[in-house]
Image (cartoon, rainbow, N blue to C red):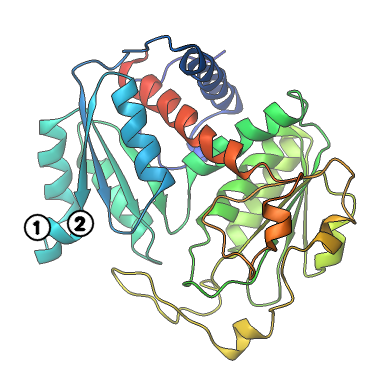
């Protein structure tokens, strides 16, 4: 077990070894059990952190805010539109000042071409850990909660599971690629057989696939990329049908701030990429359906699937709390 985490940034799970990720999961499980029993866990008493958001949030904000309170600290919510960032204050100045006021800074900034660069610029100047609450490239907290959920549902045995990350149709806004990127990079490191399925034009960056394949080769997993949706569902143990934008091939809608809705003919041509009971029936009889939420109901998925017996989305969402608490504990109060 690797246990040296204190003071490190949490921007990309690729920065942590498999052993370190397993430590995060062990701590998450311990905190989950203590929460269920009502056992206090004041590991970060009298500490403060800042939660900066350039976008809306439900699970991420509340899992961090509630989790930090349960650890004994106070998290201040910062809407970037009401900060001096809105008047052009730099990432450098923001990071230096906030890191003098508290013990950690967490930030969500998903805009294509901006978010990850901003987080890394903050990390360069901050005296305290910078935590990625989702950027344009990575969503490490979500991928960690997904991994925890799969370990729970499959009794810890993830080796050779067929896990299908499947693009799904949605109209709400042009979503970042960060969830599938983090998943396709992480899951092969635990021996899973990962299928990434999407229509042509919705590819992830080449460097992501190259890294994922290298992870698979090292840890005994596999990575298959296809535009055959039916093949992804066939015999799958885990299906994760979720929309992401075609940012790699089409930057329409790119802007420094604000979510953009882009519903064009290219998108509407793929309405059929929807998770249905019929498609689920082709998977393993004990398949689980996962989604980071919020789901675009009746576009991405039928109600009968997301509310049905194969769905574990609420357990998955709950695990955002426990994994967030584990990461904060290790980075802010560990060795």
Given residues 305 and 227, the one toward you in this image is 305
Q: Position of residue 61 (x, y in %)?
A: 35, 44
Quadrant in which residue 271 is drawn: bottom right
Q: Alpha-carbon distance for marks 2 and 1?
A: 8 Å
How would you rate the neighbour count of disc 1 (Cα within 10 Å): few for under 14, some for 14-19, many for 20 or more? Answer: few
> Which numbered circle lies on residue 244?
none
Q: Residue at x 36, y 26 (%)?
A: 328
Residue placed furthest toward the bottom: 265
> Which numbered circle lies on residue 84?
1
Q: Is residue 59 above or below residue 32?
A: below
Is residue 8 visible from the viewing direction of this image? no
**In what element is the residue under mark 2?**
helix
Q: Position of residue 275 (x, y in %)?
A: 73, 63
Is residue 252 visible from the viewing direction of this image? yes
Q: Position of residue 182 (x, y in %)?
A: 56, 48
Q: Residue at x 70, y 63 (%)?
A: 302
Query: Taking 83 as reference, is 316 left or right?
Result: right
Q: Quadrant of the C terminus?
A: top left
How would you rate the neighbour count of disc 2 (Cα within 10 Å): few for under 14, some for 14-19, many for 20 or more? Answer: some
Given residues 55 and 224, the one toward you in this image is 55
Query: Taking 219 as reference, is 126 left or right?
Result: left
Q: Residue at x 31, y 13 (%)?
A: 42
Which residue is denoted by mark 2 in the rendering?
80
Q: Residue at x 37, y 11 (%)?
A: 40
Q: Position of residue 156 (x, y in %)?
A: 73, 24
């Amino acid at each position: 077990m690797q246990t040296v985490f204190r003071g490190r940034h949490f921007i990309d799970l690729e920065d942590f070894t498999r052993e370190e990720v397993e430590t995060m999961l062990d701590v998450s499980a311990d905190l989950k059990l203590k929460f269920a029993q009502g056992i206090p866990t004041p590991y970060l008493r009298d500490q403060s952190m800042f939660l900066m958001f350039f976008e809306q949030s439900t699970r991420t904000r509340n899992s961090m805010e509630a989790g930090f309170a349960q650890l004994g600290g106070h998290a201040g919510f910062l809407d970037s539109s009401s900060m001096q960032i809105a008047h052009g204050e730099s990432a450098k100045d923001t990071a230096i000042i906030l890191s003098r006021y508290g013990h950690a800074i967490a930030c969500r900034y998903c805009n294509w071409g901006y978010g990850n660069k901003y987080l890394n610029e903050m990390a360069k100047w901050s005296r305290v850990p910078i935590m990625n609450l989702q950027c344009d490239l990575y969503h490490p907290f979500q991928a960690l909660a997904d991994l925890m959920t799969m370990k729970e549902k499959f009794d810890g045995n993830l080796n050779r599971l067929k896990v299908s990350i499947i693009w799904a149709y949605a109209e709400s806004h042009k979503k970042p690629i960060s969830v599938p990127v983090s998943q396709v990079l992480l899951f092969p490191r635990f021996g899973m057989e990962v299928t990434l399925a999407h229509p042509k034009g919705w590819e992830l960056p080449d460097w992501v696939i190259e890294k994922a394949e290298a992870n698979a080769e090292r840890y005994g997993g596999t990575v298959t990329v296809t535009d055959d949706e039916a093949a992804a569902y066939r015999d799958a143990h885990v299906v994760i049908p979720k929309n992401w934008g075609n940012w790699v091939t089409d930057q329409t809608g790119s802007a420094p701030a604000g979510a953009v809705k882009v519903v064009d003919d290219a998108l509407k041509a793929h309405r059929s990429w929807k998770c249905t009971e019929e498609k689920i029936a082709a998977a393993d009889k004990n398949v689980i359906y996962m989604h980071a939420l919020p789901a675009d109901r009746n576009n991405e998925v039928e109600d009968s699937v997301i509310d049905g017996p194969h769905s574990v989305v609420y357990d998955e969402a709950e695990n955002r709390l426990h994994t967030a608490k584990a990461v904060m504990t290790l980075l802010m109060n560990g060795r």
